Every structure is written in structure tokens, then in C-alpha cells.
Image: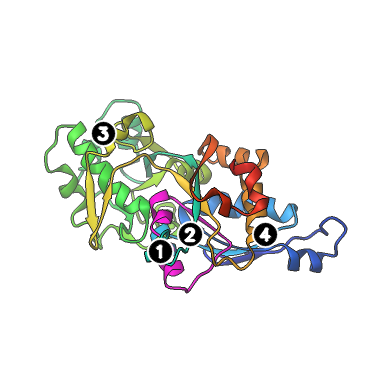
Amino acid sequence: MLSRRDFTLAAGVALFGLTADAARAAESVNLSYADSLITVMERTLIPLAAAHGLEVAGESKGSVALANLIRSGLRSPDVFISADPAVIASLMGATNDNLVAWYATFATTRLVVGYAPASPFAHSFVDVARSRRSLVDVLAQPGLRLGRTDPALDPKGYRTILAMRLLERYAHRPGFARKLLGDDRNPAQVLPDSATLLGRLEGGELDAVFLYATESTARSVPAVELPRAVNLGDPLEAPTYASVSVTIDGKTRTGAPIAFALTIPRLARNPRAGADFVALLLSPEGRAALARSGMTLFARPQVNGDPSAIPAGARSVLR
């Protein structure tokens, strides 16, 4: 069985007439990806890559945690997929040893509140979905066990804080965000990664958690929607989102529409295989799989940085 974080999935068929061993040697790709994508990756995209002769090995963590590993030289993936383009941008430029020369933003999603069907509060969330109760009132109920990811390691973690500050304003409830969340890294709520967050929710240890719509869709977790002015999922609301910010460990994060981005870092050991994976991910097959997970795909990926640094195998899907 594949682990949730570290895995190796080998292609079981020969590639273009090569033996399976030769195909694996030629097409091995090391992937680092945002752990909010863990379900669609493990259940759909990694098997799809295997069917196309790509052996994928890698890990999932919070995007900030992965960027820190790349920056420190502890990881040199062939493809890095982040849940926030700004995290990849933080690896660019001479002050960052030009670890990344370009990145492509390719999809978006929105923040939702997932809840456990067996929770004693489940009926309250159903009432919210049916517009019978206010989400603010339901979240504020005494005894509700709430979970979220670490804002120092995971974009979803700092986006949760930003969204609750927006909800506070939207609902005209001064002090709501602080009362609900406590400290930014409140140990009573904060969990190290999305896999742990979902596991605790599905295991009945939490009543509600903050998720991306992609996660709730891929894992069939019931969820209630946040208003568009709050959910960080509507580009038309970008000015509203930008009106809030949070500073974690000296780094200020300003509200912006949620977006996923990818790159092939400069020190990738097998950039050709990385390009092959990117081409597959953004092919009609890959895009369909991402769309089924709840993502909204951009009609054309938005490339930032130096497009001439994109390996040849990925240029057709990025230009």
C-alpha cells in the first residue's frame, strides 16, 4: 500500500518497445507536491503517469515546507507543485541562487469548511448549507473541535486565517476570527499537514476542518461553502482579499485568489522526465482528472519568469 507521504509507483508496462526496466531508468521523475493534492495524485495522477511509462517517486508536504527543503539543498525535485505561486516565486532570483527560473500557474480552487458526518454538529452544518443558520454562529458553538494546517508550513494554513478575518468583516462580527482560531499557530487546532487533518476528521477526532474544495471533492468530505468575498476563490474579489494580511515568522501573507503553480527547478536531476510529467499533467487527460477533483483549470497556464528556461518537453502545454 502507498504511504500518504513517501511513495514509489513503478510503471508495469514497457514504453515504446523498451523493456520495463529500461523504461523506468529512462523515465523516472522525482515529484514534490502540495499535500492538499495528495488524494488526486495518489488515486489518479500517479497511476495515470504509470500507464504512460513514467515512474514517479516523491513526497507531499505543505508547499512552504517543500520550498524550505529545496532552498536548503535537502531536496532537488524534477517537478515542484505548490498551492501558492508566491511560494515558488520565493525561490527565484540571485538572492535565492536562482533555484527556479520560471513557474506556471495552472488552476484555482476555493476554501470550504469540511465536516464529519458523524459529528454531533453535523446537523448544524447541514442547516448552514440549507441557509437556515449562519456559519459564523455554527463555528462559534462551544465544544466544536476545529482543525487547520500550520500557517508556517502550508498555504492553506495562512489562507484559513485570512478567510476568517474576511468572514469577520463580512458578518459584521468584530473579534470573531481571533475568538475562533486563537493564536495563529494555536496547538489545539493546528496539525502538521493535510493528510493528518483529513485523517483526524474522517476518524471522528475533529468536527470540522478548513479544506480546499479539491480535497472535499476528492475525499467525498461533506462541506459548506464560504461567501465568495471570503473563500479566496473568485478572481473578481481579488481587491477584497488583498485587504487582509497575516504575518507568520516575519513573513507577511496578503490575501489573494487561491492558485496552484508548478515548476521544474534549476537543480532538477532529470528535467526531461519532469517535462514529460508536466506535459501529461496539463494534457487533456491530466486536466480532466484535475477538474474531476474540483479544480478550475486555466484555459492557458500563466507563465512567469524566463520562458526560455522551460524544458522542451513541456513547452507545448505551457505556451
Report if residue 286 is visible in the image: no
Q: Earlier in the sequence, mark 2 or mark 4?
A: 2
Q: Relative to residue 138, is residue 217 drawn left or right?
A: right
The vertical placement of 72 against 238, above or below, is below
How far is the residue under mark 2 from the one under mark 4?
Answer: 17 Å
Observer able to see residue 155: yes
Q: CA distance from mark 2 to mark 1?
A: 10 Å
Q: Report if the CB atoms under discs 2 and 3 are less than 8 Å apart.
A: no
- Label 3, on which residue? 240
Residue 279 locus on image (x, y percent): 65, 48
Q: Residues within 10 Å of mark 4 (few under 14, many from 20)?
A: many
The residue that mark 1 highlights is 94
Residue in the image at 18% along x and 35% along y? 169
User: Closer to us: mark 3 or mark 1?
Assistant: 1
Left or right side of 147 for 170? left
- Residue highlighted by disc 2: 100
Q: Is residue 217 magenta?
A: no
Q: Secondary structure at mark 2?
A: loop
Q: Taking 274 as reference, is 75 above or below it? A: below
* Apparent side of residue 139 relative to residue 212 in the rendered image (left or right): left
Identified by mark 4, the residue type is: Ala
Q: Which one is in front, 146 or 300?
A: 300
Magenta-drawn segment: 67-90
Q: Indicate which disc, 2 or 1, sits on the residue closer to the N terminus.
A: 1
Q: Tell me the residue that label 4 is attached to.
A: 273
The disc labelled 3 sits on which kind of residue? Thr
Q: Earlier in the sequence, mark 3 or mark 1?
A: 1
If you read the primary sequence from the N terminus, does the residue marked by circle 3 or circle 4 appear first? 3
The C terminus sits in image quarter: top right
The label nearer to you, 3 versus 4, is: 4
